[in-house]
Amino acid sequence: MNKNELIGAVADVSGLSRSDATKAVEGVFDTITGALSKGDEVRLVGFGTFSVAKRKASTGRNPRTGEPMTIKASTQPKFKAGKGLKDAVN
């Protein structure tokens, strides 16, 4: 399912117009992104938790040349599925 299909499904289930469903889906994505960029986590009980993980700098190898290279430290978004989502999938 892609973003447009998600918007269509939200519109069908909620009875919203497609433009209102687009605003709602975009609003949810923007809010989650904003919270994660501040370093907060977003907990959706029964669905899962979005959080931010910090990766340390490390040394890797260039796959083409085999030369060692430095990989910069970074922050990565992380998602951990909740019990309700796990049970629905299994």
Image (tube, helix red, strand yellow):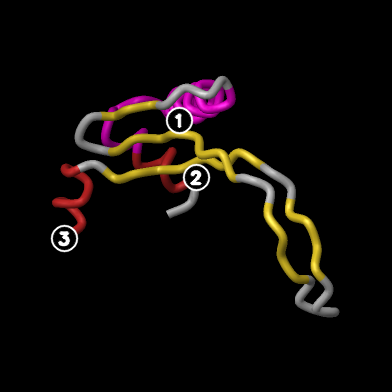
Amino acid at pointer 2: Lys
Please give left or right for residue 20 compared with residue 62 in the image. Answer: left
**Which class describes the residues within 10 Å of circle 3: few (<14), some (14-19), or many (20+)?**
few
Please give left or right for residue 1 compared with residue 48 in the image. Answer: right
Q: CA distance from mark 3 to mark 1?
A: 26 Å
Evaluate if marks 2 and 3 touch, with contact meaning CB atoms under 8 Å apart.
no
Please give left or right for residue 24 compared with residue 16 in the image. Answer: right
Q: Nearer the viewer, residue 32 or 25?
A: 32
Q: Tell me the mark number nearer the camera, choosing from 3 and 1.
A: 3
Evaluate if marks 1 and 2 touch, with contact meaning CB atoms under 8 Å apart.
yes
Amino acid at pointer 1: Val
Q: Tell me the mark number nearer the camera, choosing from 2 and 3.
A: 3
Circle number at residue 25 = 1
Q: CA distance from mark 1 to mark 2?
A: 9 Å
Circle number at residue 17 = none
| Mark 3, residue position | 90
Quarter of the picture holding the C terminus: bottom left
- Does residue 35 belong to the magenta stretch? yes
Q: Secondary structure at mark 3?
A: loop
Q: Secondary structure at mark 2?
A: helix
* Relative image position of residue 89 (x, y in whole percent): 20, 56
| Mark 2, residue position | 3
Q: In this rendering, is residue 84 above or below 17?
A: below
